[in-house]
Amino acid sequence: MELGFKFFFYAIGLGIGLAMDAFSVSLANGLNEPRMRTRKVCGVAGIFAFFQALMPLIGWICVHTILQWFGFFETLIPWIALALLGYIGGKMIYDSLACKEEDDCVQRVGFWGLVVQGIATSIDALSVGFTISEYNAWEAIFTAVIISLVTFIICLVGVFIGKTAGTRLAGKADILGGVILIAIGLEIFITSWF
């Protein structure tokens, strides 16, 4: 494939499409932690961007090496995303309802929590490896870089919107964030079957 307008248009479109789940989770993180520092905001966006780039590359590698095993794994993707996001969202809601003191109720998502969110929101991107299977290695890597940049920008916007709304919603923001995460898990699960 030639690196022309069509290539970039397709790669940016993939990035936007894949980043929507990460955007929603970034929004939930911003809602959950309205005083999040700029460094962490960039870290959140960076983790999502990393996994959104990594998963299509893993899918591409699987198409070119172990295709027979990948077909089985693809049926598990919606179940994994539902379980991970359902657990994280349910824990956010539970922690919020169990919290008595307003100041103790801010549930900051740590590094490993962000990694789990990054995997859960990007695991469906493994199947993108099938759509870019005709690309050579450099084209696949370049596509992954574009997807990563698009995801990074979209997630930055999501966190900042969430932070702004989270400040206004105060104590109920983490419940809304948990509901959003569960809804994303359900959306990934349901759309994979229909």
Image (cartoon, rainbow, N blue to C red):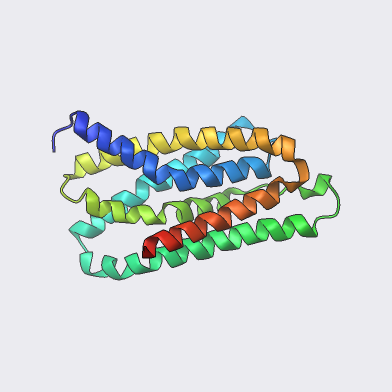
Residue 167 locus on image (x, y percent): 72, 35
- Does the rendering let one see residue 60? no
Considering depth in this image, is 192 or 102 the residue closer to the camera?
192
Which quadrant holds the N terminus? Answer: top left
Which quadrant holds the C terminus? Answer: bottom left
Direction front: furthest residue? 194
Residue 115 locus on image (x, y percent): 51, 52
Q: Is residue 8 above or below residue 77?
A: above
**Residue 4 vs residue 24: left or right?**
left
Q: In this view, does 175 lie above or below 194?
A: above
Q: Residue at x 44, y 62 (%)?
A: 190
**Residue 34 vs residue 187: left or right?**
right
Q: In this view, does 157 lie above or below 191?
A: above
Direction right: furthest residue? 101
Q: Which residue is drawn at 64% across and 61% down?
A: 90
- Does the rendering let one see residue 161? yes
